Amino acid sequence: MEAIVCFSGGHSSALVAVEAVRKYGKNNVILLNHDICLLDKASGKAGEHEDIKRFKNEVADYLKIPITYANMQGFENKDQLDIAMGIKAFQVDVGKALCTYNLKTLPFYKWLDNNFPSNIEKPREDIKIMYGFDMNEPDRIQKRSSVLGAKGYYTDYPLAFGNRTIQNIEEIGIKRPITYKIFKHANCVGCLKAGRQHWYVVYCLYPKIFQKAIQAEKQIGFSIIKDIFLEELIPIYEDIKSKGICPNDIENSASFWAKVNKTLPEQMNFLPCECSLL
């Protein structure tokens, strides 16, 4: 059995990598990653934080497995906003960002076709594609299982099913990415699937990326967040900032906005968009 770990650079995918090696042995595990351009706060280049790249390499070194890359052509110079402006759209549906499709999904399918071709009539029984979804993500598990099953591949979710041998990556002496001190996930800064809470962090800590996102919205003619443009959020964010509310995306969304609405004048109250409640 060959185990293909969808190794995103996040904490959960790292745990899956450890579980895969302990179960199948390092010679039977592939760490498959889709590299993303390096975040550059000074220039306004959105993308992946350098500490996520550090984390990926440390996990791979510990497991003694090289990272296999399936990258979008030109990923080094194009962040998610550049991709969106090139396509002239952010999403095809709520939560389905086109940057994810171009940076990850499409290269992934091409890599599978080139290295492990399959079809629904003859599923691949010699490989298993492994994800870091846990028991709190049944919808994601069902969707991935259905999509890849229709292509003739089996999937596995060791964090949701089966006996766990590791709970936190720190158990093997590796620190998770520093981004987890602010963000829920190890996604790009300026995530196009995120809501107002995430973009408040971007506004406060990555102002040049925030301005680039405003320009992208103007060029495309649609908003990243449902029903409101980022430029419209500036006065709201300024009021939140003036009250000393720390930018973070790890606090429970309902608690964060309850604190905001309690602190700000009554006329500034608003409900967060659906995305920020996910």
Image (cartoon, rainbow, N blue to C red):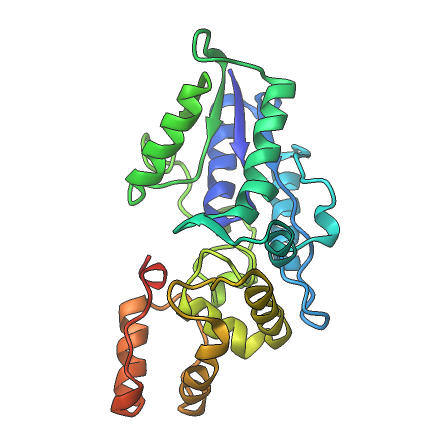
Tell me where residue 247 appears, x and y as whole percent.
46, 76
Tell me the quadrant of the picture where the C terminus can be found.
Answer: bottom left
Residue located 68% across and 64% down the image: 45
Total number of numbered labels?
0
Tell me where residue 275 appears, x and y as whole percent.
36, 59
Tell me where residue 188 appears, x and y as whole percent.
56, 57
In the depicted structure, whether residue 203 falls above or below residue 10: below
Pick whichever, 208 or 11, lies toward us: 208
Residue located 41% across and 50% down the image: 95
In the depicted structure, whether residue 72 falls above or below residue 188: above
Single out the residue that lies furthest toward the top.
122
In the depicted structure, whether residue 252 falls above or below residue 93: below
Q: With 60 as the anchor, is 252 left or right in this view? A: left
Q: With 259 as the anchor, is 30 left or right in this view? A: right
Pick whichever, 93 or 168, lies toward us: 93
Tell me where residue 86 appears, x and y as whole percent.
65, 52
Pick whichever, 165 or 162, lies toward us: 162
Residue located 29% across and 45% down the image: 136
Residue located 65% across and 32% down the image: 65
